[in-house]
Image: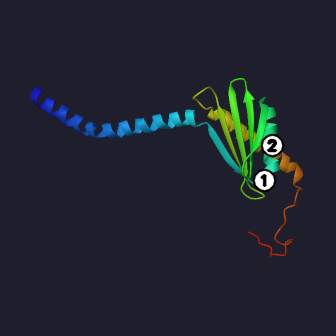
Amino acid sequence: MARYSVFFLVGACLPLAGCEPVAIALLGAGASTAIRYNLDGVAARTFTAPLAAVKNASLAALERMGLTLDSTSSFDSGETLFARAENRDIEIEIEPITKLATRLRVTAKGGSFFYDNATAIELVQQTEKLLDAGLARLTPAVPAQTPTAAGGSKVTF
């Protein structure tokens, strides 16, 4: 009986040996994702708004979060805003894609090697909220047209 239990034990362990490479690969992928999240620190989004509107919303987001604007600089077709907190350096790149589409890229650096992805994401989200609120005030309300008012046929279900 003891002789059969050894064979059973060896037979049960054989399939587990095939899982080891998969487990190691998944562990490595998870670790690299965590490291990228902490070291990358970049959040980007494209807005359907002109460069000036995105810049104003970004400046308002900096103020709303209590960050101070250090300086600005221009590059080929856009601008870079540099801001600071007590222990963070923020870089915001605003680049027009078209007259009505603008790309925003935020990098938040905390310390010498580590980046703060959460702060970068929050700045993009605050910019989005302020931009949406600003555009909502500027855009006139357009009443919804029914198909008959627009010249179409009336459809009933």
Mark 2: amino acid: Ala
Say which element carries label 2. Answer: helix
Q: Are marks 2 and 1 in contact (CB under 8 Å)?
A: yes
Label 2, label 1: how far apart the Cα atoms are: 11 Å
x, y percentage for residue 81?
Answer: 75, 39
Say whether residue 18 is left or right of residue 32.
left
Say whether residue 3 is left or right of residue 41.
left
Nearer to us in this view, 60 or 141: 60
Q: Is residue 151 visible?
A: yes
**Does 154 sit above or below residue 70?**
below
Q: Residues within 10 Å of mark 2 (few under 14, many from 20)?
A: many
x, y percentage for residue 133?
Answer: 83, 45
Say which element carries label 1. Answer: loop
Q: Colour mode?
A: rainbow
Mark 1: amino acid: Ala
Residue at 73% in and 29% down? 84
Res. 49 mark? 1
**Does 152 sit above or below residue 29?**
below
Q: Residues within 10 Å of mark 1 (few under 14, many from 20)?
A: some
x, y percentage for residue 9?
Answer: 19, 31
Task: Report which quarter residue 117 is drawn in.
Answer: top right
Q: Is residue 130 visible?
A: no
> Which of marks 1 and 2 precedes in the sequence?
1
Residue at 77% in and 39% down? 72
Residue at 78% in and 53% down? 49
The residue wearing badge 2 is: 57
Nearer to us in this view, 107 or 20: 107
